[in-house]
Each structure stands twice: as structure tokens, then as C-alpha cells.
Amino acid sequence: MCGLAGFLGPPNAEGERRLAAMIERLAHRGPDSSGLWVDTAAGIGLGHARLSIVDLSPAGHQPMASKSGRYVLVFNGEIYNHLDLRGALEQGGHAPGWRGHSDTETLVAGFDAWGVAATVSRAIGMFAFAVWDRKTRKLVLGRDRMGEKPLYYGWQGEGAHRTFLFGSELRALQAHPSCGAEIDRNAVAQFMRYGHVSGAPAIYAGLFRLTPGCLAQVSLDSPEVAVTPYWSAIEAAHQPKPEEDPRETIDALDALLRDAVSRQMLADVPLGAFLSGGIDSSLIVGLMQAQSERPIQTFTMGFREPRYNEAAFAARVAEHLGTQHTELYVEDATLRDVVPMLPDIYDEPFADASQIPTFLVSKLAKGSIKVALSGDGGDELFCGYDRYRQGAGLMQRLEGVPKSLRRIAAGAARAVPAGVWDKTLAPLRKVPVGKEPNGQWMHRMADYAASGSIEELHHKLVSRWRWPEEVVNDGREPQSVLAGLAPPRRGESDAERMMLLDQLTYLPDGILTKVDRAAMHVSLETRAPLLDHRVVAFAGRLPLEMKLRGASSKWALRQVLYRYVPAELIERPKMGFEVPVGVWLRGPLRDWAEDLLASQHVRESGLLDALLVGQMWQEHLSERFNWGLQLWNVLMLLSWQRRHCEPAQAVGTRR
């Protein structure tokens, strides 16, 4: 796993120096070596920062040219079936005379033999790349199917200075003098809703992230970026669901997962895994240990708050499997040290508070290993989130009630002040410590009940701020990437629809962004076997009852897991990677939050309504409401802006 960056624009004698500055910003992604390739006459520059994982020798150095000299490649990620691809190239008489055994060399040889699109379609892996075709003078960018690896791009500058920039992180693009880096208020509104910027547009106007499963092509002669898919998560989710014997299906899933894990254990450096003690990570570790002659190294984070702590469960799973286990508990002092680092770790605003333990467990693991496998993807593929079951159940109960009546009733419920609901519902609903008060809960439930479709309900379920334009000054939330999604297909259930929606947005833009940035900040490669596209396709073929049975989620994964770990070590209410952010903001992080939320600072930011933010902060401190998640968005935005943006920087908006 590495970092890449580059440019395409008018010839400039300063090209190599500018490229070096871009790559220097990505040193954390690739501390082992770096490389630059510039063709001044063509206006192209490709740079690479290398984290050596497979083939540690100079034979894996990038940028790398194909044997014919036609293609020059910079590549970030891993191709897990590259040995199979090498075999196919050799059988077809296309082997170039291998210099080493890196997957980068395999990939560029495939480009020579089969072309870029055909090679990528054959690849199993996670990746982002940029390849320059010296014959056609075209640049092609590519990103893996599920969005594990990031890739940003966009035209920046004016007139003779207009340049196409691309890179693994926005900070690399900002190092180029053509990059304007003007904040897009509309993207800010979207960030406030989700806690991350979602879809193609980035936080800066004119910059974009490449959609997962797509290639993008651009040239100086044809400057309009042509984005084309080579794989579709939608089609993978909508495969025929043949009737099969459940035991045979579980056997097939077990075999496929063993193969996926085995391929992802290929590395020339120490390897281990994250272990939370939940279904997904326990399954991955169980499959790893079953195929390893030595104890697998496993790592977990613990919390002092019992309601959020899974470390004890992880320790029991590790003991059963015989792994070499390490755990670390999050202390108040650690929180105060890490939180100011978050704007550097995430160079685009990001506000999932589990980013803190994700960074800490990555840092912990990096002390012993260079590659960590994780269980990411299990919830979105195998129906793991409670919202799938609960959302589908709610829509089913609402089917017999006219939409107009639902909306009238919901409006009436929201019109009752939250404090009145608190008193009215107190005898009926006991509020757990740290959870939202009854009035806040009632307003949220009323909003859900007013939903006219499963897409509308899902949109609300994944929203932190359900009306972000109320807090973002002059921001208009852009249309969701899901707005143009085709309606549900015949036979597609509400739960399956929500899983697909998350696969297209929350998984790449939230979960995978969180893990990639946290791990790469400490130069640790992470791999997610459940996101092998063959596993994704297998999950798409499974009927819902193989994923959700009553209140039991991820049924098929559980059946495979129980072959490696006893059910009694796993069966408990789902906790997720939750953190007590509301409690932290009233406790160890209060001083830090007070500084950022001071009214003059919020006003000076120019982005948010200082009066509304101040009111919510006071309500949170008084415990009248639990605004922890919403305030975390505010805090991450303000701390990011303070770190990455000049005070006098123009703040733009895109209509």
C-alpha cells in the first residue's frame, strides 16, 4: 500500500520540483522509498511513495514502465491474484521476462498484453492507480470495486496554468501551485448530514473522488474527464438467487472465505489482524489461524466505559484461537493527545468518532506488524446493522397508513416541545445513561414515521443532522449520489435495498475512508477479505433468509464462524465500534471542545450558525439533550478548517 500523485498540463520546467512536493505530502503512506517520472514535453508527471509489502527489492520500485515502454504506472494497493495473472501471461506468451515478483510488475505487463480495462477486470484486489499511455498520450485513473483505496482528481488553475491534478489524498493536490482549494459550502452541508463527504465531489470546489469500480480517462486534447464503470455493485447485489441446500451454501461460503483470506495473507513482511471479538473480525482471525502454522498477532482497543467495551470478548476469542494477542485501553490522557491530531490524519473533514480507536489500534499494531486484516464489509453485505431489520419492520407497519396521514401525525408529534415529551414518556420509557432523552427520541421517531419510501427512511437513519442547511451558512446540500438510483427491482426487500445503499455510499465514504486514513497515517496496510469482489457477488446471490433470520443478523457468516469459534463466545447484543463521544465531550474533551465552540471562533469560521451551535452545546452540557454526534461533526469541521485553511481563504459555493 502506497501513495501516488501527479499532474497533466502545459509543459513546465518546474514539473519535477512540483511533483516532488506533492509526493512529500504522502510520505506517511509510503515511507520506504519514493520515485518520480516526468515527461516535460507531454506535460505529464507521475510520483509514488512506496510502502514495501510484496517484493521488497528495487524491482518493485515505481513509477514502473511496461516492457514495451508504452505504459508508465503508479499503483497503490494489492492484487491478490497476481500470481494467477502471471501464469496466464506466461501461458499466452506475454511474459516480459520478470525483473521481480511484485504485483505492480504483473499489472503493467497485463496492460501491455490485454489493455488496461481488461486487466483490471481480471484483478482481485484493492487498488488505485494512474497510468500514462505514451502511445495515445492519455492518462487513465482506476479505483478498486468497493472503494478501499482513495483517489482524488480535478482540473485546477486558469488559462495557461490550468492543470489536471490527481493523488491519493487531497493534501498532495494542494501542494501544486495550480490548486485553488476553495471550500465548497454545499459539500460542507453534506458533511454535516453524514459526518463525511459523500459521493464524487470533494470538500474543495472542482475536486472529485473517483467512483469505486470505475476508470477515468483524460488528455490535453480531450480535457473532459470520461468516467466509465468496469464493475457494478448494483449488478452484484441483483444476481439471481437460486434455491440451494443451506449446508452446501455454507460449505461454499467457507471455502470462498478461506481462499480470500489465504490470498490476503500473502506478504513479505509481518502480518496480523484487528480483533474486536465480534462476528466479522473473529471470523477473519479464525480463518487466518486455521491456515497459519504460527500464532496470528491480533490487536484490540478497550474502553473503560463497560457499555462500549468489547476488549474482554476479543480476549476470549483470542485465547480460544491461540493468537498472540495485544490490547490497549483508551485513557483520558490518550484522548486529549489524539484528538488534536485528527485534522492531520483526515485531510478532508471526517466525523466518525470511532476514528480515534481505529487510529490507536493501527498505531498499536504498527509496533509489531506491517499488514493488518480486518472484518470490514460484513455488516453491509450480510445484513449486520440493526437499521436494516428495524427500518424494514417500520416500513412494513406503516404500509397500511396513508402517507398524508403519517406526515400530519409526525408533524403534530414534532410540534410538541421535547421537554413535554420527556415528562410524558418518563413513566413508559426509561432512558439508558448517556442516551438521547425521550423528547429527542420522540421527535426522531416521528420523522422516521413520515418517510414515504425505504430510500427516504434510510437517508434519515444514516443522517447526523437531518436538516444541515439550518446550520451551514449559505450551503445547499447537493443531490445524493443515490438520487438517480433505479427503483428497487422486483423481489428486492427493504432490508436488501438498504444494504445496497450503504454499499454505494456509507461503506466507501465512511467506513473505508476511516480505516485507510487512520492506518496509513502510521504506515500500516489494512486488508478486508470480506470485500473480495467474489465474496460480494456471493453475498448478492444469497436470499435474505440466509442473512437475516428473526432477530439474528449475518446468519450465513455466523454458521461459518461457528466452525472455528464456539457460539457462546460470540452471541451477545451487537455493540459495533461505538465510542462514548457524548460522555467524552462533557468530560475529558470538554476544554478542547470549549475552545473550538467559542462563539467568536464559530463566527470567524464563516461556515456555521454560531447561535445554533452555541445553543446545542449548552443543551448538551446540561444533559437536556444528547447532541454528541451532531457536535462531533461541528468540532471535526472547525478543527479541520483551522488546520488546513488560511483564515482569509475564500469560501465558495457551488449551485
Image: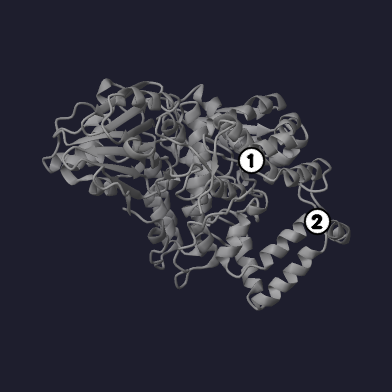
Q: Quadrant of the N terminus?
A: top left
Q: Is residue 375 visible?
A: no
Q: Left of 18 or right of it: where is 310?
A: right
* Outermost residue to the left: 93
Q: Residue 547: x percent and y percent?
A: 52, 59
Q: Is residue 66 visible?
A: yes
Q: Name the residue under label 2.
A: 438
Q: What is the secondary structure assignment of the residue under circle 1?
A: loop
Q: Which of the pair 646/191 is nearer the observer?
A: 646
Q: Which of the pair 189/64 is nearer the observer?
A: 189
Q: Left of 280 or right of it: where is 219?
A: left
* Outermost residue to the front: 159
N-terminal label among 1 and 2: 2
- Marks 1/2 in contact by CB < 8 Å: the verdict is no
Q: Residue 646: x percent and y percent?
A: 56, 30
Q: Residue 309: x percent and y percent?
A: 68, 38
Q: Which of the pair 236/265 is nearer the observer?
A: 236
Which residue lies at the image location 65% right of the left edge and 33% below the top edge? Answer: 302
Spatial CA span between label 1 and label 2: 33 Å
Which tag is nearer the camera, tag 1 or tag 2?
1
Q: Name the residue under label 1.
A: 606
In this rendering, the answer to whether 643 lies above or below 281 is: above
Amino acid type at mark 1 = Gly
In this rendering, the answer to whether 156 lies above or below 268 is: below
Q: Residue 201: x percent and y percent?
A: 46, 48
